[in-house]
Amino acid sequence: MEDWLSKINESAAVYGWSERQTIFYALPKLTGLAKKWYDGLTSVKFSWIEWQEKLLEAFPCDENYGDILWEMLNLDCITHGIYDFNIKMNVQGARFEKPEQVLNYFRNIPSKSNNETFVTRRLQLDTREHPWTLNQKYFKPVRVNGLELTGYVDFGSECTLISEDSCHKLGLSLSSQNLPLLRGFGNNAIVPAGKVSIRIIVDLVDVELTAYVVSSSLLPTDVLIGQSLTEISTVRAYKTDKELTLYQVTANKTNTIILKPSKCAIIKKDTIVEVKSVPEYTGQVSSDPTPIMTEDINVDPEIAGDVKHQLIKLLNQNRDCFALSSNELGKTEVTENANKAQ
């Protein structure tokens, strides 16, 4: 009724209606219950102001104040009342869709403690832009305890994280002993819901590790793969501008040397830096060869995917025994081989 009366008053102002004209044009427009109410009146000798008062009294606003308050309870109202700058920025950056998600985030914010253990994450899965707009090469199909999930490789994260929803799908039991604080969700620290031991397969890597469980609303991917996997001594990363492949090599520390810069240098693009070896070494050196991928070899298409994965894993574990090109065969001056054509 308030909206209808407002439109009548606006029309009266636009067309210059007098009070009598306004009443003449407005009242015949009443319909339904309002018309029945009008027809039942014993007198119609009222001014326009009195008509408005009677109409509002007869047809008050039927809005429920509970509904009004619920509509007001949106994320903007919630974040406006947060005085901690870091928490406020993190909530706004996460772009939660429901107040329940914000409440769940608040419940995971730990109270201050003198025995905090910090596990930092470089990557903030920034939901201000949809997470899947990040560099696609870091997103990987992974297999956790035999279940196909989606993972994200974060070389800056000190730990591996898994979402609560994924844990429920896997039926994992969470341990709550010696849980650290996880920093990197904005500038805040949260306590994980627990930790689990999992077997994870990503690309050519197959390892068992501990993963910390966090709310699915805070982790827009099933698994975040951190340094607990990427920093394993036998794990290597083959990376280009469009491709990232993780693979494992056989541990062989006897043939490994460390290269360090001979002096301080500013590293720029295509900069040559003088290095020294630790321990001292003179001779040829080579880096790990590129991993052997499925497309590099001819495999019967009817062979199951798990069998192909095991084959590729075996080839890369013994990568020094296989060559993809003549350049990888190397050469020697110890002996000569003479081939005489007949």
Image (cartoon, rainbow, N blue to C red):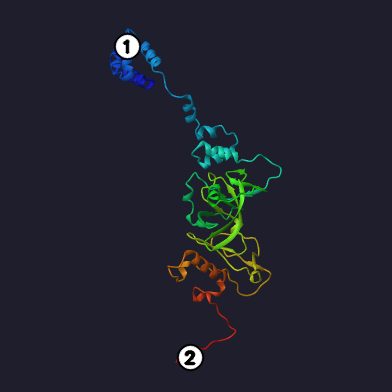
Which residue is located at x 57 percent, y 40 percent? 105
Q: Quadrant of the C terminus?
A: bottom left
The answer to whether one can see residue 102 in this image is: yes
Q: Picture coordinates of residue 126 (x, y %)?
A: 52, 46
Amino acid identity at mark 2: Lys
Which callout, 2 or 1, points to the residue nearer the camera?
1
Mark positioned earlier in the residue sequence (2 or 1): 1
Quadrant in the picture for residue 231: bottom right
Q: Picture coordinates of residue 307 (x, y %)?
A: 50, 67
Helix, strand or loop at mark 2: loop
Which residue is located at x 37 percent, y 10 percent? 50
Front-most of residues 51 and 305: 305
Quadrant in the picture for residue 3: top left
Helix, strand or loop at mark 1: loop
Residue picked out by circle 1: 40
- Dot 2: few (<14), some (14–19), or many (≥20) neighbours within 10 Å? few
Front-most of residues 188 and 115: 115
Amino acid identity at mark 1: Gly
Residue 320 drawn above or below residue 339: above
Residue picked out by circle 2: 340
- Dot 1: few (<14), some (14–19), or many (≥20) neighbours within 10 Å? few
* Disc assigned to residue 184: none
Tag 2 near tag 1, CB within 8 Å: no
* Number of residue marks: 2
Residue 193 falls left or right of residue 94: right
Which residue is located at x 47 percent, y 50 percent? 132
